[in-house]
Image (spheres, rainbow, N blue to C red):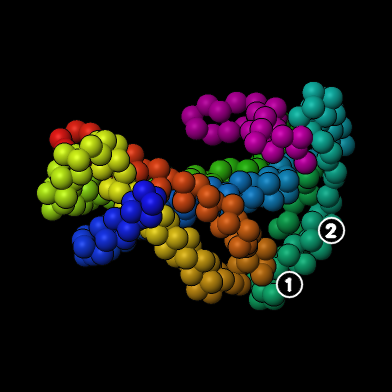
């Protein structure tokens, strides 16, 4: 009987302050949606790191007049790095092999290939790393000096090019996007909590006569406050449901629409429905817990009856 009465009070309270309830749900949904987006971006970044860092290679481009002695010295250093567990494997790529790979890589840009002479593509050593994030160790091993901003490498080496530097810049941008999304989500969450607090105070004020009578006939303070806490928790849960629905809509119309070609080419990994379901419990828990605790604290601090 008591449970039925409390639930009826929760329903009545939500209907009585309908506009405030809708505003509370929408504000909560926006902040939780951004939180979920931030979590999904983090998962995407982690997946992309696994994909790209496994393919990172360092290229040691050689001078055209490199001698056999210089090549032997370079291979000696690479063997040492392999023994130190920095290099997983390496191989030599002649000018002819490099040009064939260049033609395959840019086969869709025939004009570019035709205007690039074969002698412009240098021979190189292609080096795979044990830990892709330590790509700088290879360049450091072959650097003789860096005076005046000019980097000088061992004899026979023209330059050392690492793909990891490019990836680090890419992931730096993605990490910034993730942090900005979460920062906006936190700002929205603060706005939602303030709105929940004001809504609870308003609801408690409009029903002060009813709760006063309940206290006079022996109802405990906890019993009179439970409906308000549940109202906020239900609003938080509805906001979380809207946030999850928004993430599915974003996946369908933005990710699978605007970025379809990039997903098909493997440039970025797809966002699966299972990824959204994986973060949904956290979103729902955050919505219910934050709303419920905010309502309870508001009643404890500002409402005396």
Residue 129 shown in magenta: yes
Q: Position of residue 134 (x, y in %)?
A: 66, 33
Q: Residue at x 52, y 53 (%)?
A: 280
Of the numbered discs in the image, which one, if any, rests on residue 186?
none
Judged left or right of residue 280, residue 179 is: left
Judged left or right of residue 74, residue 1 is: left
Determine whether the residue tagged by mark 1 lies in a helix, strand or loop: loop
Q: Residue at x 84, y 24 (%)?
A: 83
Of label 1 and label 2, which has the lower sequence position? 2
Residue 182 shown in magenta: no
Give 200 or 8, whichever is nearer the viewer.
8
Q: Residue at x 77, y 67 (%)?
A: 104
**Comparing labels 1 and 2, the label whose residue is closer to the camera:** 1
Which residue position is annotated with label 2? 96
Give 159 or 134, whichever is nearer the viewer.
134
Which residue position is annotated with label 1? 107
Q: Residues within 10 Å of mark 1 (few under 14, many from 20)?
A: few
Q: Pick the quarter of the image with the C terminus.
A: top left
Distance CA(mark 1)–CA(mark 2) = 16 Å
Q: Which residues are magenta?
A: 127-152
Q: Position of residue 298 (x, y in %)?
A: 22, 39
Q: Quadrant of residue 59?
A: top right
Residue 170 visible in the picture: no
Give 245 or 14, whichever is nearer the viewer.
14
Question: Can you say whether 4 is above or below 148 in the image?
Answer: below
């Amino acid at each position: 009987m008591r449970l039925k009465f409390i639930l009826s009070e929760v329903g009545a309270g939500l209907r009585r302050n309908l506009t405030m309830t809708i505003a509370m749900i929408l504000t909560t949904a926006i902040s939780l949606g951004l939180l979920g987006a931030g979590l999904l971006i983090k998962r995407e970044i982690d997946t992309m790191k696994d994909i790209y860092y496994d393919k990172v290679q360092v290229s040691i481009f050689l001078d055209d007049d490199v001698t056999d002695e210089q090549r032997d010295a370079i291979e000696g250093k690479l063997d040492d790095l392999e023994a130190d567990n920095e290099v997983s494997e390496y191989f030599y790529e002649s000018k002819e092999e490099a040009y064939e790979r260049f033609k395959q890589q840019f086969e869709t840009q025939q004009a570019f290939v035709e205007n690039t002479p074969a002698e412009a593509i240098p021979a190189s050593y292609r080096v795979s790393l044990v830990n892709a994030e330590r790509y700088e160790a290879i360049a450091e091993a072959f650097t003789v000096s860096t005076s005046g901003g000019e980097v000088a490498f061992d004899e026979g080496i023209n330059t050392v090019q690492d793909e990891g530097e490019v990836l680090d810049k890419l992931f730096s941008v993605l990490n910034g996007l993730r942090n900005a999304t979460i920062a906006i989500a936190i700002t929205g969450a603060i706005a939602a909590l303030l709105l929940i607090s004001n809504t609870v105070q308003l609801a408690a004020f409009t029903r002060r006569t009813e709760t006063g009578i309940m206290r006079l006939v022996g109802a405990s303070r906890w019993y009179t406050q439970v409906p308000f806490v549940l109202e906020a928790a239900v609003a938080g849960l509805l906001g979380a449901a809207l946030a999850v629905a928004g993430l599915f809509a974003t996946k369908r119309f933005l990710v699978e629409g605007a970025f379809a070609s990039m997903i098909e080419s493997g440039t970025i990994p797809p966002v699966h429905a299972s990824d959204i379901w994986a973060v949904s419990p956290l979103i729902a828990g955050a919505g219910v817990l934050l709303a419920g605790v905010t309502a309870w604290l508001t009643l404890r601090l500002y409402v005396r009856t």
